[in-house]
Image (cartoon, rainbow, N blue to C red):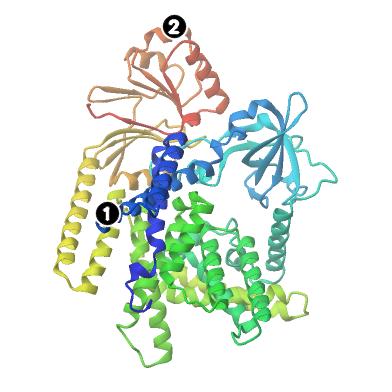
Amino acid sequence: MWGRAAKWKRAPFIRLLAPLAIGIWLNDHSQPAVSSIAISLLASIALLFVLQVKWLDIPYRYRWIPGIAITLALLLTGCLLHYCGRIENRDDWIGTNCHDYTYFKSIVASHPVTKGKYCKVTLKVFAGITASGKLRTTRGSVIAYISPSTQTALVQGSTVWFPSGKIKPIIETNNPGAFDFKAFAARQDIHHTAYLNDGDLVIPAGQRHHAYYSIIGKLQKSFHDMVSRFIQPKPSRALALALLIGYRDDLDKELLQAYVNTGVVHVIAVSGMHLGLIFLLLQKITRLNLTAKRKVLWLKSILVLICIWVFSLTAGASASVIRAAFMFSFTQLSNLLRKSIDPAQLLSCSAFCLLCFEPEWLFDAGFQLSFAALTGIIYYQPAITSLLQPQNKILQALWELSAVSLAAQILTLPISIGLFRQTPVYFLLGNILAVPLSNIALVLGLVTYFLQWIPKAPDLFGWVTGTLIQWMNHSITSLDQLPGSVINGLQWTFLQVILAFTLILTVTLCFITTRRIFLMASLILLFLFGLEGFRDHYLQSKQELLVIYHRPGRSGIELILGTSSYLLYHPKTRYSQDLQRSCHSFYRVNRTKPLPGQLITYKNHKIAIPWNHSSLPGMLEQQPDYLILTQPVYWKPEWSGKLAPTCLVILDASLPEKAGKKLETILQQQGIRYYNIRKKGALISDLAPQ
């Protein structure tokens, strides 16, 4: 029956997934009142119940009304799930009652990672002591930076206490085009950081460890120890850890960027591809025979699933890995029940269940790319494979691998450009080289892990694993050095991404049905895509912006006029060149010029950047609209009267933190408008006439 049914009918969960995802997205962007969501949801459920009453005979032409009620109920369910899933909406969140506590009780939820002078570790708060000495439940996660001397005493899963006054909200940097760490951390329910000295952490003796974090921590440490002992040569160890447990903190940044530029970054982290390989190996080892006794079948299947889920959790439990584990669990269950399940139905059902469990995964890049790639493989890979039928088995295997890469790229391309503003050129060759090598290295790495207590065997397998990784690194870095390996500066708007997906759909339907209406729709969508791109280019060619970056200890001040940038800076400050590159890509800047001077006038705007304390009074006489302080100054009370009422005093990120706080207090007391870059993030001021 399913073989003759349309793909849409073979995967009815797609019709349930779409409104749920839209509801999550709407709540994230509009954030309606939870009471309105709950009342509307109850009303839609009540309407659906009334429509299903037997005595209410609805004419056939009105059968779409229950469908509307179900869609509305799912949309509102998505809104409600997203609201309830955000920790900042809870009454016991540490962000709302931090001042009620003196100490927080927390669990060490991650392995400490050395970051410069500090060690970074995630602490999950679950209780706190009030000023009166009472222990109360409170929730939240904190990224703590501790001294390396304290690192050895911290064990993942252990319980630690730290002062509540040490936590600070994560600052929103707002740097245009740069990575938004605050938004990234918020998706993981992390909203605070803390810098803890040696005496701040209290590690009680005799405390029971948290079972989950303790077991995962011990498994990860055992992989760390195995890689350090047996994987040779040493440069291959960092990538071996990324392959085996998804640990990427030790990876060389230039090497990681090479994998990104060649479109094979998915092979150096535990992904659905690697989990699928492990799943197939486990099935081969257990030799699941459907004619065996039911108890034996169930026992083998449970063993396989336990191994899959333990490995997934040890590897960091990312969205793409959990997606794969979930799908393999469904596949194993369907095999046991002797029930076939359509791949599209399996994929949409997995996405639906995972979003119900963690709505924030909808905005996770790994989640989006994972489902997009697998959807492309399901729908496009068979058609691409049928285009060529090589007789040689090696060529056939290479062509099938190429077909999978091409099919995955079809739906991941719009997401990659929308998120990262670039696309790889040699992704096909990169996958042909990296996928086989990474799969073999993964299997041999696991063999090394399980044979590490047998003399000589782990040394041999570890050397082979390291050598394969070394070959893969050399191949990818060489590929990255080829001219035009990546196309940068692809700035697509959100509307263009939506139009691109719609265009892919209409072109696909045009090839399947050969109907002229889909050809016309594709041409119209292509025209709208180009029109939206032209509109965005035109608006950016007319932009007039003053941009001041947020990078503590460094200065970054630019005047962006159209596609040209003019650098304004103090000669003694350190300039943020990395942020400048991200900003130029975001605003399509193609020409940069230095603009020295302490007073810059553009149209009716005056921008003053005094180089020292003595030049400040002269700047104030010019009545500037923007006064940017990049050096510590002693603010005299009489200077306040010289400022124009509309003047904005900007405390640059290059100012020392103590000097910035002192100036902020003075300006606040004297009622002067100011903006502290360190606290509020980057300043982007539109200078165009309104």
Assess whether mark 1 and mark 2 are in contact (beta carbons under 8 angstroms).
no
Extreme-front residue of the structure: 55
Residue 486 placed where, x, y %?
36, 62
Q: Residue at x 14, y 68 (%)?
A: 516
Residue 633 placed where, x, y %?
49, 19
* Residue under pointer 2: 638
Q: Is residue 442 left or right of residue 4?
A: right
Rendered-image quadrant of the N terminus: bottom left
Q: Residue type at mark 2: give it.
A: Glu
- Say which quarter of the image contains residue 244: bottom right
How many marks do you count on the picture? Answer: 2
Residue 247 placed where, x, y %?
60, 59
Mark 2 residue crowding within 10 angstroms, few (<14) / some (14–19) / many (20+): few
Q: Residue at x 50, y 19 (%)?
A: 664
* Residue under pointer 1: 62
Q: Residue at x 60, y 87 (%)?
A: 291
Q: Residue at x 36, y 65 (%)?
A: 485
Helix, strand or loop at label 2? It is: helix
Q: Earlier in the sequence, mark 2 or mark 1?
A: 1
Extreme-bottom residue of the structure: 391
Mark 1 residue crowding within 10 angstroms, few (<14) / some (14–19) / many (20+): few
What distance separates the C-alpha of mark 2 from that of mark 1? Answer: 76 Å
Rendered-image quadrant of the C terminus: top left
Determine if residue 481 is in view.
Answer: no
Residue 94 placed where, x, y %?
62, 34
Q: Residue type at mark 1: give it.
A: Tyr
In the foreground, 35 or 121: 35
